[in-house]
Image (spheres, rainbow, N blue to C red):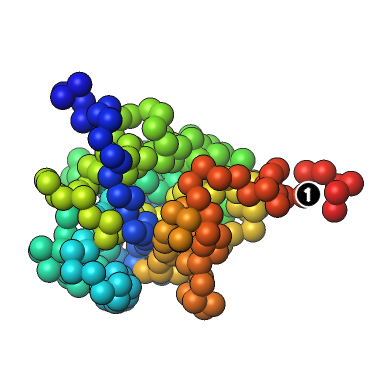
Amino acid sequence: MAQFPERSMAAPCPRPRRIILVRHGQSEGNVDESVYTRVPDPKIGLTPKGWRDAEECGLRILDLVAGDGADDWKVYFYVSPYRRTLETLRGLGKAFERSRIAGVREEPRVREQDFGTFLVIPSPYNLLSVCLHGIGNFQDREKMRIEKEIRRRYGRFFYRFPNGESAADVYDRITGFVTATGFRETLKADIDIGRFQPPGERSPNMNLVIVSHGLTLRVFLMRWYKWTVEQFEGLNNFDNGGMLVMQTGSGGRYCLFLFKLGILKQRTAKPGELNYDFVTDGSSFFTHLV
């Protein structure tokens, strides 16, 4: 049993105070879609504005977590391995002293949606650039425009890009990250065993920050809060460098913090507790109850 600390009967580690979702700063692809025709998606970086987005987001996070007044608060980061998210992490990390950063984990399961491979070779093109970038990950702008229009008509959640992913596919891999299924190194397992806690510490003032991509973060929220497909399709991306905070309420459940209203939604809900007002995630499943 000593070899598997997560199986011990000791009192559970305190849950992190917050889970903060951050979308990467403005990327080169956000301002010029032609970049996707010559640079692989994972290698697209931030613009100068994107770096400012990241640094400003870091300061907002600092104000939020330091505002609790606790002396022992720390932040722990999960980050997509794409260049634009790694650069965003570096930008927002400038707000924190080394002693406040509990750790970082690169997590491929929170990467961007795969939009497919069109096998387009940009022109001019030469052998050196093939060796540097490879082929098969570039987008054809006209084909992508058509595919996105088809997705709009078909439905944003279920439409799968040719040789790529649908939002439903992203949901499946996010499930492996959020729950205890799949790999042992999952977010739920990390929370349960306090993997991000420094040795010998059990602080309730840990804050998890997930730096990822627009659709991936929407799918994360859908999976976490068990939203319906219809609810997902009504969501829009965060702004570049934007963040959304899941904060523990008085009942212990992670609730969406509504900054404009200054309140916690479901602030008294407890982990594992059903919402008995909408036991089926809303009355729309049973129209005779509307």
Q: Is residue 259 visible?
A: yes
Does residue 178 lie above or below 103 as drawn?
above
**Other residues around mark 1 within 10 Å, as few (<14) / some (14–19) / many (≥20):** few
| Residue pictured at 37% horizontal, 40% vertical | 188
Q: Across the whole image, how many numbered discs are drawn on residues?
A: 1
| Residue pictured at 48% horizontal, 35% vertical | 172
Residue 11 place in picture, x, y as percent: 28, 39
Q: Is residue 133 visible?
A: no
Q: Is residue 199 left or right of residue 284?
A: left
Residue 155 place in picture, x, y as percent: 66, 47
Task: Identify the residue at the far right of this view.
Answer: 288
Residue 246 place in picture, x, y as percent: 43, 59
Disc 1 residue type (three-letter): Ser
Q: Nearer the viewer, residue 92 or 121?
A: 92
Does residue 237 lie above or below 281 as drawn?
below
Quarter of the rendering containing residue 2: top left
Q: Is residue 287 left or right of residue 95?
A: right
Q: Nearer the viewer, residue 66 or 32?
A: 66
| Residue pictured at 18% horizontal, 64% vertical | 72
Task: Identify the residue at the far top of this view.
Answer: 1
Does residue 120 lie above or below 206 as drawn?
above
Quarter of the rendering containing residue 22: bottom left
Q: Nearer the viewer, residue 196 or 108?
A: 196
For the N terminus, which image quadrant?
top left
Classify mark 1: helix, strand or loop: helix
| Residue pictured at 21% horizontal, 50% vertical | 202
Residue 212 place in picture, x, y as percent: 36, 54
Q: Is residue 287 left or right of residue 156?
A: right
Question: Mark 1 = which residue?
Answer: 284
